[in-house]
Amino acid sequence: MSQRTHAGDVRRGVVPLLRRAVVAEWGTLFATLREQLARKRFAAVPLAVVATFLILLFSIVQHLPGGEGFVTRIGVVKAGLPLDVSLLRTPLSLYVPALDLPVWGALAQVLVVFGIAEIVLGRRMTLVVAYACTLAGTIFARIGLHIGPDHLFGFPAWIAHARDTGPSAAVVALAICIAWKCRAWATGAAVIGTMIAEAVAIPNLAGLEHIVALISAVLIAATAEVFGSYWPRVLSGVGAARLVAAEGRRTALP
């Protein structure tokens, strides 16, 4: 009887501990999301809605007769393409899902992660992180192709013709920035650990690009943390100095 009571006490002690851990990890995030979504609903995440729609649209179009060629010409990036062509296609390449993967996965990832990022980070920062980290992966693939398979981070020649599209790198990067902003360190560590395990277990282009996206996201988050309020403070100080100088000139006039 006493053993069962002791076990019950242990369980009752573990549940509050887990609850406190969940609140500490995600409490700020949940509160922010609940407030914004309760007030605005889908109007709070227009970027996420548009991005999800674009992925669905490209998925449908590229499976239509002649659609794959059209999508390839406007949104498919490959490491063997000229750099200017890759840069022009990169904004749309983020919304072109892989042909051999279920599109519902990309749709769910973008709607959820982009939506959370849009509320937590802001629309402008969400776009900056998504495109900068996607572009970092694209540049990394080109560098790996250039240095060749004899180097640690080099790629074989066939990588030049592989499709390098999809939102996964942007999703990973945004997840890291959200975790940093909300101080959800365990979540961020879990994302990093998962991506490293994926890159080790399946050593392909996508896995390595995810690692590049992680590194880029950490650098962006750290830079925003250190310098994010620097220029606003400087501009505020300049404005205050101008007001003081103007007041001084008015006082000095006879």
Image (tube, rainbow, N blue to C red):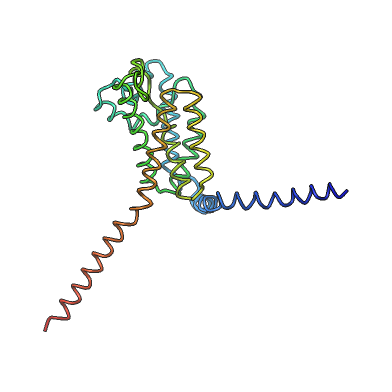
From the viewer's side, name the closer residue of 155 and 172.
155
Using the image as rendered, state which of residue 221 and residue 54 is in the foreground: 221
Q: Residue at x 32, y 22 (%)?
A: 79
Q: Position of residue 134 (x, y in %)?
A: 37, 33
- Give the residue displayed 44% in from the left and 27% down from the top: 207
Name the spot of residue 87 as percent of width and height, x first: 28, 30
Query: What residue is drawn where x is 51% and y is 41%?
Result: 189
Give above or below for 227 relative to 204: below
* Residue 109 point in image, percent of width and height: 49, 35
> Left or right: 151 with respect to 57?
left
Q: Is residue 164 above or below residue 115?
A: above
Q: What is the residue that sits farthest to the right in this orientation?
A: 1
Q: Nearer the viewer, residue 120 or 6?
A: 6
Location of the C terminus (image quadrant): bottom left
Left or right side of 109 for 62: left
Residue extending furthest bottom? Answer: 254
Q: Residue furthest left?
A: 254
- Occupied quadrant, residue 69: top left
Q: Residue at x 36, y 29 (%)?
A: 93
